[in-house]
Amino acid sequence: MKVEKKLQELGFEIPEVAAPAGVYVLARRVGNLLYLAGQTAHVNGEVKVKGVVGKDLTIEEGQEGARLSALNILSVLKSELGDLDRVKQFVQMIGYVRCTDDFGNYTGVVDGASILFQELYGETGLAARMTIGTNELPGGSVTEIMTVVEVED
């Protein structure tokens, strides 16, 4: 439970797992890889960071949304694995950022999630990553992030 202790020391707690918002599963394990569905900036089923970076929101506010997405990823991981210490490494992350057409720093926004994972897991918390700007996300969320992690049995 080292990761959960670190999370508490950073002032965060794992939210409740939200039910899928459509016809899909939250996670699918293939061998030692666990593929997680995209997670938005929601808490208890309600999107907490809504808006458009570059219009309504600053980069820092977008990063807060990315951290919420990351916390929801941790929630799904805990639900699937029982213990966050079973994550061996983050393999891939794809982050979507709701932003204006001329906003180009979506990488900086998704850093909010990457920094949290790095603080919790060290270098193994850093994944190969792709970031994409978009005009809309579910519920008006500023971010949606999906991950693939390698897990230990």
Image (cartoon, helix red, strand yellow):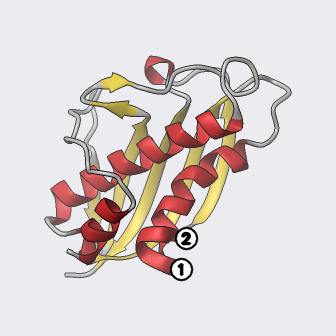
Residue at image x 39%, y 67%?
149
Q: Residues within 10 Å of mark 1 (few under 14, many from 20)?
A: few
The foreground one among 29 and 21 is: 21
- Compared to residue 47, the image places residue 78 above or below, namely below
SS of the residue under disc 1:
helix
Q: Of all residues shown, which one is farthest toward the right?
A: 102
Q: Secondary structure at mark 2?
A: loop
Q: Which residue is mark 2?
A: 126
Image position of 134 (left or right of 48): right
Cβ–Cβ under 8 Å for marks 2 and 1: yes
The quadrant the C terminus occupies is bottom left
Q: Which residue is drawn at the image coordinates 37% and 45% (left, top)?
A: 37
Q: CA distance from mark 2 to mark 1?
A: 6 Å
In the figure, is residue 64 to the left or right of 34? right
- 150 to 55, vertically: above or below: below
Q: Give amino acid for label 2.
A: Leu
Rendered image quadrant of residue 28: bottom left
User: How many numbered circles does the render carry?
Assistant: 2
At 61% from the left and 48% from the top, the residue drawn is: 110
Residue 34 lies in quadrant: bottom left
Task: Give residue 2's quadrant in the image.
Answer: bottom left
**As displayed, is residue 20 above or below residue 17?**
above
- Where does residue 115 sit, x and y in percent of width and height? 56, 61
Left or right of residue 15: residue 11: right
Residue corresponding to mark 1: 123
x, y percent for residue 64: 53, 40
User: Could you tell me residue 7's position as x and y percent?
Assistant: 33, 62
Above or below 6: residue 28: above
Q: Amino acid at mark 1?
A: Glu
Q: Residue 107, position in %: x, y?
A: 71, 49
